[in-house]
Amino acid sequence: MITDSRVAGREIVFTNSHGSRVSHRFGATIVEWSYEPGPGDPHPVVSGRDDYEAFDIAEGLVYTQFHHRRDVPNVAVSLVLDFEHGRSLAVVSTIGEPADDRTRGQHTFLPGLIEGLATSGAEPAPTAALLGRRVLWTYGDGHRYEHVHLEPRSYSWRCVAGPAAGLAGADECTTYELRPEIYVLAARENAAPSASVTIADHRDLAALRSYGAVFGLAGTGERPTQTTFGAVGELLGHAATTV
């Protein structure tokens, strides 16, 4: 586990866009959480404890992720905490049943306000800022993928190194801006029942970085698992977009 001192040993409570109160008490490697739905939120009262990982993205900006293995195994949470601006963004990944009109992996986006902190800056919101960018990502295992952002709701990819070299495709995605040039890219794969969440740091175009996790069905295709990844990136240029 990689943990960050900004969350370890702290209890962090925020109210999300449904008016629901969500509490997280972070230990060294375990997070205890509870969800109290606000008026009109159909979500039940629920609580649990999970292993977690946390990454320091920028000054006062932390990304944490955890999988509800014990209580709701088809759900994983990616949580961004912006202590500098008093804001949060929860991205809830779910693996649902097969359907003709959607991918099995789905995302729900819930901005929030952190209790006890002053609020400033813009709320995390969908963005088209990545449109046209061609990026070559190199992952820790030596795999290399080229991503091209041509449409607001999808991106194309091509594996240029690794066991999947030569494969290519396009997946549905949603992009949120956290801070200038720091993004959440949530992708829903067509070929496999999975949903990924990536924090993509584009502040230094000569040295892009990303952190995140893929949540999906592994092994027999029946057991949801979450796999962490990290990558460094190179901006290859810009492509003509369709919008």
Image (cartoon, rainbow, N blue to C red):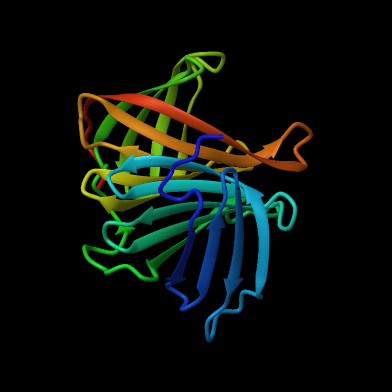
Image position of 83 with respect to 166: above or below: below
Identified at 23% across, 32% down, the residue is 239
| Farthest residue, direction bottom | 39
Q: Where is residue 49 in the image (x, y as percent from the top left)?
A: 67, 55
Which quadrant of the structure image shows residue 151? top left
Identified at 55% across, 38% down, the residue is 214
Identified at 40% across, 67% down, the residue is 112
Q: Position of residue 119 (x, y in %)?
A: 27, 68
Report the front residue among 155 and 185.
185
| Farthest residue, direction front | 9
Decide if residue 119 is in sight here. Answer: yes
Q: In this view, does 55 lie to the left or right of 239?
A: right
Q: Where is residue 63 in the image (x, y as percent from the top left)?
A: 43, 46
Image quarter in which the N terminus is found: top right
Decide if residue 173 is in sight here. Answer: no
Image position of 204 with respect to 101: above or below: above
Q: Where is residue 184 in the image (x, y as percent from the top left)?
A: 37, 47
Task: Give the mark count.
Answer: 0
